[in-house]
Image: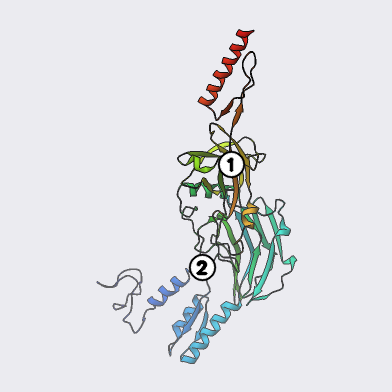
């Protein structure tokens, strides 16, 4: 320092920041060296490599000694390159990972494909540069608990350099995923997933169904992670540092179906040009019972060619019910008015391999036929000529017929 004061924690002179010392060409009292040693010794377990590029590297070598670091002398370009290459080689050669575990907990939107899913349904593989790498079953264990899959590598097993380890098992959307998607669509949510997108690089090999695409997260929040211990060995010094990192979130999609309702008139649709009929959708249990209104209707009329659809239906059992039409009886196909939409049906629909079509992938037809009702009055006797009265429709026609029938009964009693 300019005034011979070897302190390095206060300003030396007006205008000089703390910690700056010397004239720029010397460190006469070792203040800068002492400051550097103190800073380096606060580094914890990190290994320190010191490279001296001066023609007189005495202090640099002393710095390495006081900080228990490795020292390299490099007074030429070749020596400098060699020093860096050696440092890189030591780091790569003596760093490894052990105590590795891969944990994946499914979200409420995903479930295992098999009801009896177990460790045998999980596949663990290793590959390098596209080629398979041997991995023994004794190198790891698989446990399944609830909706969590965990792969734990054996004690002492170190991940091989440049090898990719893959854990694979099959999942499918839950009923909650289907129901929520269908509800979102009814509420004019364009994607049905409330702007949720899959993270980058989350596609399975050969598919593009997740990365930056809308869907439901298949992993629970903070549920997919990698645990490990990193081992660094430099010279005779070895450090082990535990760590973990979360995997990015992939997404999955659902598919929906639709019920197409078509009306037939026994006396011809042209006679009902200005009319309309309301059809209601109800949802039932798996046995087709306990049907409840889901507040969804379609109106059938001539303008729509007496056809309409209930779209974006989640898997389930539905009942189609037409409002009563006076003078007509309704018959249905299917006769029980029930339609069962299944996930298997939806995923077996065309375009399953490309997985680019998700809405209304399968159509379930329902036909309602309205038949005109003809009612015959009972023949009457008792002095009057027997006649057959044909009563068409309902309402006033039926009332008139009843009045006439009552009249003949009255005449019969009077004559007797």
Marks 2 and 1 in Cβ contact (< 8 Å): no
The image quadrant of residue 318 is top right
Which residue is label 2 attached to? 44
* The N terminus: image quadrant: bottom left
What residue do we see at 46% from left, 72% from top? 40
Which of the pair 227/359 is nearer the observer? 359
The image quadrant of residue 29 is bottom left
Q: Is residue 141 left or right of residue 384?
A: right
Which residue is label 1 attached to? 368
- SS state under label 1: strand
Residue 100: in sight, yes or no?
Answer: yes
Q: Is residue 302 left or right of residue 124?
A: left
* The C terminus: image quadrant: top right
The CA span between labels 2 and 1 is 80 Å
Q: Position of residue 369 (x, y in %)?
A: 59, 41
Looking at the image, tell me whether mark 2 or mark 1 is earlier in sequence order: 2
Which of the pair 311/411 is nearer the observer? 411
Which of the pair 54/245 is nearer the observer? 245
Residue 298: in sight, yes or no?
Answer: no
């Amino acid at each position: 320092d300019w005034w011979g004061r070897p302190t390095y924690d206060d300003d030396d002179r007006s205008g000089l920041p703390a910690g700056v010392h010397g004239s720029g060409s010397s460190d006469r009292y070792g203040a800068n060296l002492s400051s550097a040693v103190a800073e380096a010794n606060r580094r914890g377990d990190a290994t320190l490599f010191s490279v001296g590029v001066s023609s007189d590297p005495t202090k640099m070598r002393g710095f390495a000694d006081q900080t228990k670091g490795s020292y390299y002398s490099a007074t030429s370009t070749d020596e400098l390159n060699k020093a860096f290459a050696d440092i890189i080689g030591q780091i790569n050669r003596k760093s490894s990972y052990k105590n590795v575990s891969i944990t994946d907990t499914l979200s409420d939107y995903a479930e295992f494909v098999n009801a009896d899913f177990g460790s045998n349904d999980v596949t663990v593989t290793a590959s390098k540069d596209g080629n398979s790498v041997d991995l023994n079953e004794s190198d790891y264990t698989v446990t399944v608990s609830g909706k969590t899959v965990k792969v734990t590598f054996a004690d002492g097993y170190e991940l091989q350099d440049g090898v990719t380890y893959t854990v694979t098992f099959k999942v499918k959307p839950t009923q909650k995923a289907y129901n929520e998607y269908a509800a979102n669509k009814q509420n004019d949510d364009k994607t049905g997933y409330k702007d949720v997108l899959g993270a980058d690089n989350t596609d399975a090999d050969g598919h593009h169904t997740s990365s930056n695409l809308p869907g439901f997260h298949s992993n629970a929040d903070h549920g997919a992670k990698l645990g490990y211990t990193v081992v660094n060995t430099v010279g005779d010094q070895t450090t082990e540092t535990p760590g973990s990192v979360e995997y990015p979130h992939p997404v999955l999609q659902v598919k929906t179906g639709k019920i197409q309702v078509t009306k037939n008139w026994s006396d011809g649709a042209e006679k009902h040009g200005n009319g309309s009929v309301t059809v209601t959708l109800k949802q039932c249990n798996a046995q087709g019972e306990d049907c409840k209104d889901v507040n969804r209707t379609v109106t059938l009329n001539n303008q729509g060619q007496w056809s309409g659809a209930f779209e974006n239906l989640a898997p389930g059992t539905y009942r189609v019910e037409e409002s009563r039409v006076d003078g007509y009886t309704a018959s249905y196909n299917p006769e029980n008015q029930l339609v069962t939409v299944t996930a298997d049906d939806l995923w077996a629909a065309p375009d399953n391999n490309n997985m680019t079509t998700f809405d209304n992938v399968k159509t379930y037809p329902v036909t309602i036929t309205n038949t005109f009702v003809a009612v015959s009055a009972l023949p009457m006797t008792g002095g009057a000529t027997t006649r057959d009265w044909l009563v068409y429709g309902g309402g006033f026609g039926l009332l008139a017929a009843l009045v006439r029938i009552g009249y003949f009964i009255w005449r019969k009693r009077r004559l007797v």
